[in-house]
Image (cartoon, rainbow, N blue to C red):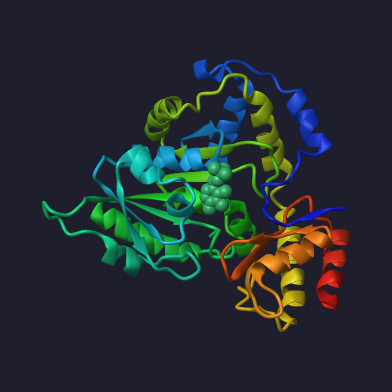
Amino acid sequence: MIIDLRSDTVTKPSDAMLEAMLKAPVGDDVFSEDPTINQLESMAANMFGMEAALFCPSGTMTNQIAIKCHTQPGDEVICDELSHIYQYEGGGIAFNSGCSVKLLKGNKGRITAAQVLEGINPDHDYKAVSSLVSVENTTNRGGGACYNCIDLQDIKEVCLKYNLKLHLDGARLFNALIAKQETTKEYGNIFDSISICLSKGLGTPVGSLLLGTAAFIKKGRRVRKVFGGGMRQAGYLAAAGIFALENNIHRLAADHLHAKQIGEALSKKDFVTNLVEPETNILVFEVLQPYTPVSFVEFMARNEVLAFAISPTQVRLVTHLDITPAMVTRLLSIIEKM
Ligand SMILES: *Cc1c(COP(=O)(O)O)cnc(C)c1O
């Protein structure tokens, strides 16, 4: 029994999800004729109280389409230095949109309205035009930390005042909503665009959604085609998304409980330090003597537990829907004996 805690992207579709996929009516989505994709898009837009949605192959694509639609070449995007859009999307902000970035040093990947205000360039010929702010919730490199809605409202005020667009990289937004007991509608109210991943905690094999106004999504569809993301009978994948939105949101609380239990066991160990108290399903900690992150990961692998050394000092563990309570119990006993 392998316990794979490298990422919440490693989940396999359940039998019930596969059954829903097999039964999906499909059509050519480039002609907007896939009924299952159309259903998923309108379902997601309604959940967030937003006008429209766009089904895409990945969260990188939904983020990159949003950045492209909100900016002009030469503009500047404001985000935290740990942001996925900056760290893990292959330089796409420059490659796809021709934009520079203003990196803010936030707290666990979270930025404040005051920092955003300070990050906006003055209106001079020699300065890039600040046109977009992107925030991440939950934060990936920040150890799954969540924003409070009120702090996002403050960022929105600054954006409105200075005429900047506000994008949410909500790859794990549902983890934040469950942890903070917030609603999709609150988020739909704040952001110009939202990206959510169906293939992380929600457990589908493929897929992300971009949400926004009808005009924004119309433009986004065009950019998706240019980026090579126009899909045909992808309703089989959208059916997994519908299944996930209907069945896999509330159970995220179990993943959060598992992360907490594992975190408590780790924090009792002398070789673990700077463990970021898990707010959701991600645990990030530093490893000390007699282990290194690499030797810790190797030790775990010998015990059929897969972990991820994310830096020369840090290890990351992520819980997800394929991690059972029995697996957590086994992991706790492995940690105890270390
Ligand atoms: C996983 C992730 C994405 C999207 O990743 P894809 O692998 O392209 O789907 C975007 N943002 C964050 C914060 C993520 O964790």
Question: How many labels were placed on the picture?
Answer: 0
Q: Is residue 58 above or below residue 325?
A: above
- The image shows residue 320 at horizontal and vertical percentages of 73, 54
Give the x, y percent position of residue 185: 52, 49
Q: Which residue, as the protein is rendered here, is positioned at the far left?
A: 125
Residue under the point 54% across and 65% down: 142
Q: Residue at x 50, y 24 (%)?
A: 230
Q: In which quadrant is the C terminus drawn?
A: bottom right
Specify the quadrant of the image occupied by residue 144. bottom right
Give the left or right position of residue 68, taking residue 227 as reference. left
Percent position of residue 211, x then y: 48, 39
From the viewer's perspective, is 144 left or right of 130?
right
Q: In the image, 154: left or right of 331?
A: left
Quick check: 265 above or below 157? below
Name which residue lies at 46% across and 36% down: 51
Q: Position of residue 304 (x, y in %)?
A: 83, 58
116 left or right of 55?
left
Front one among 68 and 55:
68
